[in-house]
Image: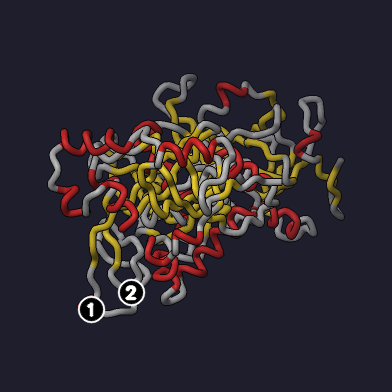
Amino acid sequence: MAYSSSTRDFVALSDLHPNLARPNVIGVVIGKTDVRGFPDRKNIGSERYTFSFTIRDSPTYFINVSSWGREEYIRSLSESFRVGDCVTIENPLVQSKEAEREEKFNPVTPSCYKLLLSENHSVVKTSSCYEMDTKLLSLLHLPVKDPQDYYSLGDIIANGQSLDGRILNVLAAVMSVGEPKYFMTSDKRKGQRCEVKLYDETEMSFPIVCWDNESIQLAQSWIPRETVIFASDVRINFDKFRNCMTATVISKTIITTNPETAEANVLFSFIKESAQPGALHGKMEEQSKESINLETIVDVYTVEQLKEKALQSDGKLEPVYGILYGYISTLDIDDNASKVIRNRCSICRFLVNEMSNTCTFCSDISSDSKSTFASFDILVNLTDHTGTLYSCYLSDCVAEETLGCTVHEFLTLTEDKTTALKWQLLLERSKIYFKVTLSPSWRTGLKVNVLSCKLADPIEASQSLLGKETGNKRLHYMA
């Protein structure tokens, strides 16, 4: 397959191989690194310069391109285009790549090859004049990874330091973009840093840090509370200084701005709903036990049945209210109080910014009339004999009732008493009322809100597992 224009033919990236004579390719730039200098082994005392970028010409194919040479040539070439530009490359060298070595520091690509540019033989041009541009530009909104393969921000925080150093994909909305900060390194090189705050349905403030000019320039184009990003291959770390999890853009990272995927559309809807006055208050209220009559919930499910129901829903699962006879299998309340207690806005009841202790959604209301209150915000795992529901939401008054104490009482507990409280609840057969919604932005695909969790009557729990009716309760079988 080859793309054609009025002046030349372009070889599809999927058709490239080392035996092609003077190939020409066209693609949209989806990733790019800064220029770097290295000591030249052949010429002691001088430096060679390099930078790399990734181009894409179809939904399924993209390839890494590298260029080495004199500083003047490399800097001039790098400055001639940015991420999002369409470029044509004439006569690149097609070379087989060593996947394990190449992909340690470069984006993972489906191609078996890489392209090398020569100052004397290769030419790179921006290509705004070709009819292919519209098709190529649409590729900017397609993630390079499976759009369902990502961690929610809440999932990252829930897993905590176990993810330190891991390379993950993240789908999130942009809450704020910081100003770039410039500095000088110890070896007299110029450096820069920009921090972006992300949010999603599970977490309202999560930092991602950019250290290179290319990602910083890209970040400056993002619109807070409007832009959604899919960041593939970011590094997750635990920041000991700030005592929180963070993400970092690295040389492997490719960021897709405003991805056109079903999962991103759900997040776009969340952004829109969150921006509406009063919408968040209703969202939080529905998670409170007082807003739901538990006596109307009679259907009993197993974990396996819930997962099957979600798989059969074709992405259109209506909220499901039900009862689960199981137990809490993960309850990390004795590690760090800041991980399970968050401040909420007294007006909209949404989580407030931890750094400024202000609500980002009530910015139009005088600060004098706003206040915050401490509330439980815990992610737990729920397990029964058929499986586990991960990262279930146990919050506010439901959490207080489950733990048997208020936030203020919890904060007065010693470490030993907190651990004892944890083990009073862990692995105890419980009757759990829940609400489940299909949520692609939640890594498990199912967002589970616990509405009530109390120790189960042994006879009632046993009969429910045997499929027998007890009183007004009935076991719900899925077709």
Q: CA distance from mark 2 to mark 1?
A: 11 Å
**Which residue carries the number 1 mark?**
369
**Which residue carries the number 2 mark?**
363
Which comes before the other along the chain, label 2 or label 1?
Answer: 2
Between residues 39 and 226, which one lies in front from this camera angle? Answer: 226
- Residue drawn at the location 53% of the way across and 51% of the way down: 473
Residue type pointed to by label 2: Ser
Q: Position of residue 322 (x, y in %)?
A: 52, 52
Q: Residues within 10 Å of mark 2 (few under 14, many from 20)?
A: few
Q: Is 377 on the left or on the right of 414, as rendered?
A: right
The reply to whether residue 73 is in sight is no
Q: Position of residue 124 (x, y in %)?
A: 67, 45
Q: Position of residue 181 (x, y in %)?
A: 32, 53
On residue 128, the disc is none
The colour scheme used here is secondary structure
Residue type pointed to by label 1: Ser
